[in-house]
Image: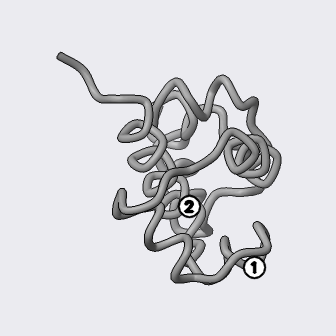
Amino acid sequence: MGMSLAERVRVTVAALLHATGESQAALAGVLGVTQGQVSRRQSGTAAWSLDDCDALAAHYGIDVLDLLAGPSRACEELPDARRAVRERADTGERERKR
């Protein structure tokens, strides 16, 4: 059996935070909530709402369906400009080796 949608959103948000180098506190500021609220959503003690999913997708510049599809899809669709500098450098290095 696969992940529940709630688990998938938590894992996807964690992957997006990692890919962008963004902190929970920074994400909280964008969403208009506290870092503690983001932490509770990420730990599963509170749920990400559909409105949260819309806001997350808009913030990361991806379609909400890509967010809900899981971490691989969401990170693939993440615009290059939103990626952490280190990740962009790694991608550029891989491109040069091809």
Mark 2, residue position: 89
- Percent position (x, y) of residue 60? 73, 50
Query: Is 49 positioned to the left or the right of 51 in the image?
Result: left
Quadrant containing the N terminus in the rendered view:
top left
Position of 24 with respect to 94 (left or right) is right
Q: Quadrant of residue 63?
A: top right
Look at the picture and state if 32 lies above or below 79.
below
Coordinates of residue 5 in the picture (x, y in percent): 43, 30
Q: Helix, strand or loop at disc 2?
A: helix
Label 1 or label 2, whichever comes before in sequence order? 1
Q: Residue 82: horizontal and vertical position, in percent?
A: 72, 57
Q: Please state if 17 lies on the left or on the right of 64 as rendered.
A: left
Q: Quadrant of residue 20?
A: bottom right
Estimate the spatial distance between the alpha carbons at disc 1 and disc 2, rounded to whole Å: 27 Å
Q: Which mark is residue 29?
A: 1
Helix, strand or loop at mark 1: helix
Report the number of numbered marks.
Answer: 2
Outermost residue, front side: 46
- Residue 53, given in percent of the width and then of the height, sits at 68, 43
User: Which residue lies at the image location 53% right of the left edge and 63% below the top edge?
Assistant: 17
Disc 2 residue type (three-letter): Ala
> Amino acid type of disc 1?
Gly
Closest to the observer, 92 or 36: 36
Give the class, few, some or many, for how many residues have Cα within 10 Å of label 1's Cα (few <14, many ≥20): few
Query: Which residue sits at x=79%, y=74%?
Result: 32
Numbered label attached to residue 87:
none
Q: Going 52% across and 24% down the picture, which residue do you hit?
A: 69
